Image (tube, grey):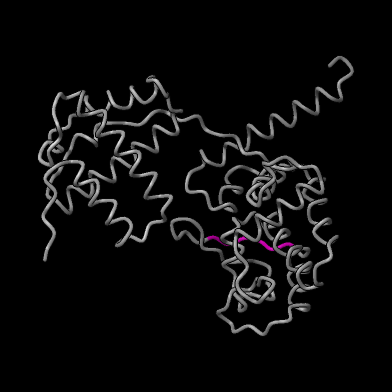
Amino acid sequence: MTAAAPATAREALSAWLDYLTNERRASPRTVRAYGDAVLAYLAFLEPHRGEALSLAAMSDISAADVRAYSANRRTGDHPLAPRSVSQALSAIRAFHRWLDRRLATPNAALALVRGPKLPRGVPRPMSEDQARALISDAGQSDREDWEIARDEAVLTLLWGCGLRISEALSLVRADAPLGETLRITGKGGKTRLVPVLPAVREAVDLYLTALPFALSPDQPLFRAQRGGAYSPRHAQALMQRLRGQLGLPASATPHALRHSFATHLLGAGADLRSIQELLGHASLSTTQRYTAVDAAGLLAVYAKAHPHA
């Protein structure tokens, strides 16, 4: 027996969450976050509009209604940060898209609403000494020799080639031994060529020599303790352990090594356009964030070294 179509906005929300859970296979955390955001949206709209919301009424929600909701979330009894408001609006837009596709309840007003302007974060790289110590300390453990070699190879790849952790772990057995360049497919399916330093090739070669598992050409190159694929979670756990050993801040993550790659190149005189290509950034404005980091580093050196500082 086919379930009756939702008649109210809240019934539609329940059906959407069921769709996310059973058809999209979204994680429970995602479903809960989306559900909380849209429920708060509906709970605001009902008294704001002075009526219980039918399904049909969702087509009549105006841009002014959504802006009033956004303002209320930022200034109400439990104000949200701009980033949280932006995330809530993303969930609301996803809900309205589903209403349009599945329940023939379109609403063009959402396209007129812009989220709050978010501050652009500045990358937090590590110094050269910190990056070197990180790789060196990866070898100071009671793990198997091949696991130590793997950890050193992964960290060297991130710093030496500026890869995202997902890109480093996407390498397969057929990619190694590494050549002078690596062809990497990054975000948005964009492909780039990355030069490979001798130190990176050597680290990966040492890992291959010690690796106790025979791999087919299309299997992931980096393996976990029991032979399965090495995951980003493993890399994050490695960095957490090394942070504790070296007293590094929480910002010392696998991605911080990619930031370090860019910042150290910039400090050595590389131009922004070349760094953009090496990182695979679609926009130069994304790469330009590193100029703020480098300028901050120069000021810190000046403040420390100048006799009048």
Whether residue 111 appears in magenta in the rendering, the answer is no
- Horizontal side of 294 relative to 33 (left or right) equals right
Residue at image x 43%, y 34%? 84
Image side of residue 210 versus residue 278, left or right: right
Q: Position of residue 11 (x, y in %)?
A: 19, 46
Principal secondary structure, stretch drawn in magenta: strand
Task: State the image coordinates of residue 285 (x, y, percent, origin top left).
Answer: 51, 38
Residue 207, quarter of the rendered image:
bottom right
Residue furthest out toward the top: 308
Nearer-the-camera pick, 211 or 127: 211
**Front residue of this view, candidates 199 and 43:** 43
Instruction: Residue 201: name its quadrant.
Output: bottom right
Extent of the magenta region: 192-197
Instruction: Identify the residue at horizontal 39%, vertical 23% (top origin).
Output: 74
Tell me what residue is drawn at x 81 percent, y 51 percent. 132
Q: Is residue 24 left or right of residue 250?
A: left
Relative image position of residue 200 (x, y in whole percent): 74, 64
Q: Is residue 26 above or below residue 290?
A: below
Image coords of residue 165 (percent x, y): 60, 58
User: What residue occupies the far right of the structure in this picture?
Assistant: 307
Whether residue 194 is in magenta: the answer is yes
Q: Residue furthest front?
A: 1
Give the quarter of the image for residue 264.
Answer: top right
The image quadrant where one finds the C terminus is top right
Quadrant containing the N terminus in the rendered view: bottom left
Q: How many marks?
A: 0
Residue at x-position 59% and y-position 70% = 171
Check the image and report above or below for 285 versus 5: above
> On screen, 115 above or below 185?
above
